[in-house]
Amino acid sequence: LESLTGIRLTSDEKNRIRRNLEEYRPITVGKNKNDSDEIYKDLMSYSFAKPRNAEKDIKLYEWRHLLHAVEKIINKY
């Protein structure tokens, strides 16, 4: 969202956004989650625009929710 809007968000704002996105029921993938191991490895293998600073779990959202979720968050901030 920071890239889309050009606005730096505080940690509190980022946490609020994460909570607001929970209604879209993300799938959590991580290093030690056997059912998502391959997806996690693929995401971590990107060398450009790394998706992380530390190896943490990542929440994935279904594409069908993308437009509504982005509109919801941008309208709130």
Image: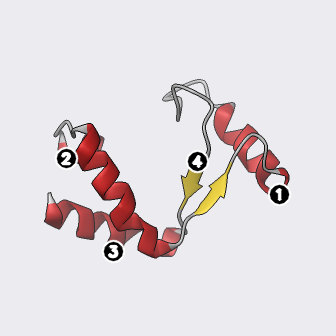
Which residue matches tag 3?
68
Tell me, yes or no, whether the two marked residues, 2 and 4, touch with CB atoms within 8 Å: no
Where disc 1 sits, the SS reads helix
Where disc 4 sits, the SS reads strand
Tell me, yes or no, whether the two marked residues, 1 and 2, touch with CB atoms within 8 Å: no
> Gap between marks 2 and 4, in whole Å?
22 Å
Q: Amino acid at mark 2?
A: Thr
- Residue shown at 53% from the left, 32% from the top: 52
Q: Where the C terminus falls, by quadrant? A: bottom left
Query: Can residue 15 be seen by looking at this rendering?
Result: yes
| Of pointers 3 and 2, the one earlier in the residue sequence | 2
Q: Amino acid at mark 4?
A: Ile
Which residue matches tag 4?
58
- Residue shown at 60% from the left, 37% from the top: 56
Which residue matches tag 1?
35
Q: Is residue 45 above or below residue 3?
A: above
Q: Is residue 71 left or right of residue 25?
A: left
Q: Position of residue 26 (x, y in %)?
A: 55, 65
> Gap between marks 1 and 2, in whole Å?
34 Å
Which residue matches tag 2?
5
Where disc 2 sits, the SS reads helix
**Dot 2, how many residues are within 10 Å of its Cα: few (below 14), some (14-19), or many (20+)?**
few
Q: Is residue 46 above or below residue 64?
A: above
- Residue shown at 51% from the left, 68% from the top: 63
| Of pointers 4 and 3, the one earlier in the residue sequence | 4
> Gap between marks 3 and 2, in whole Å?
16 Å
Q: Is residue 71 above or below residue 58?
A: below
